[in-house]
Amino acid sequence: MKKKQKTTDPQRETRSRSAEVIARNVCLGLTGAALQACLGAQQQVPPVRLEPPPQECPAGAVKIMTETLGLSIGEMKAVDWSDVRGRPVPVREDSTVRVGGHWETAQGQIALPDETRLSGRLYFGEKRVYGRFTTAHTPSGETYRVCMELMDNRDDAGLPIEPGSELGNVLVSPLALVRVVDRFD
């Protein structure tokens, strides 16, 4: 009995090996991508955030604040984010603050009534939240251009970011101050 000699087709063998190499590379690539995705998710670090750059006040804001409303550059007023007291509150880039009580001028006139909302933009630094408020909305519907910055109770710009904050849920003190400025520094 003669043994049948196995003949191989060199083209078929090359195709077979090529297919194996491709399959192995695809598997390794997918495994690597999955591993990177898993490692990346575990090591997610928020981007480094910086203080906002200097900026001019909105056109006409200083004149409106000093002449129309009777406010002085440098004067400060207590504000809050909501009725929450005693615990940090979450804020977003577009969060507004409200004036607590009437904001009176040095002559005793009401410049901005109680519950006036100040809107503008919050900037999230590495350790503080900075606020630049450019519009005052009174409860009666009047709107004024303003130039006011968020302050803490130690006369420092911005508020410290509270413990428990995370990306997308930044917590700050429920109470703050705003200061009338003639330019954002």
Image (spheres, rainbow, N blue to C red):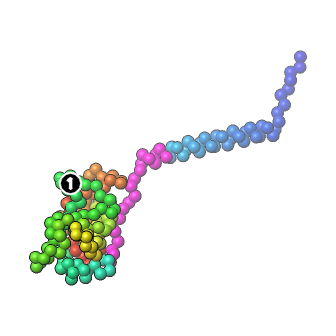
**Can you give x and y, in whole percent of width and height, for residue 183 in the image?**
28, 77
- Determine the residue located farthest toward the right in the rendered image: 1
Magenta part mainly helix, strand or loop?
Answer: loop
User: Callout 1: helix, strand or loop?
Assistant: loop
Examine the structure image and report whether residue 62 is included in the region drawn in magenta: no
| Quarter of the image with the C terminus in it | bottom left
Vertical relation: 63 (above or below) 81: below
- Give the camera-side residue of 91 and 21: 91
Question: Is 60 on the left-hand or right-hand side of 70?
Answer: right
Residue for badge 1: 84
Image quarter for residue 26?
top right
**Can you give x and y, in whole percent of width and height, for residue 92 in the image?**
32, 59
Vertical relation: 48 (above or below) 64: above
Q: Which residues are magenta?
A: 37-56
Vertical relation: 127 (above or below) 28: below
- Residue visible at 15% across and 66% down in the picture: 101
- Determine the residue located farthest toward the left in the rendered image: 108
- Determine the residue located farthest toward the top in the rendered image: 1
Image quarter for residue 4?
top right
Image quarter for residue 27?
top right
- Residue visible at 59% across and 42% down in the picture: 28
- Give the camera-side residue of 98 and 32: 98
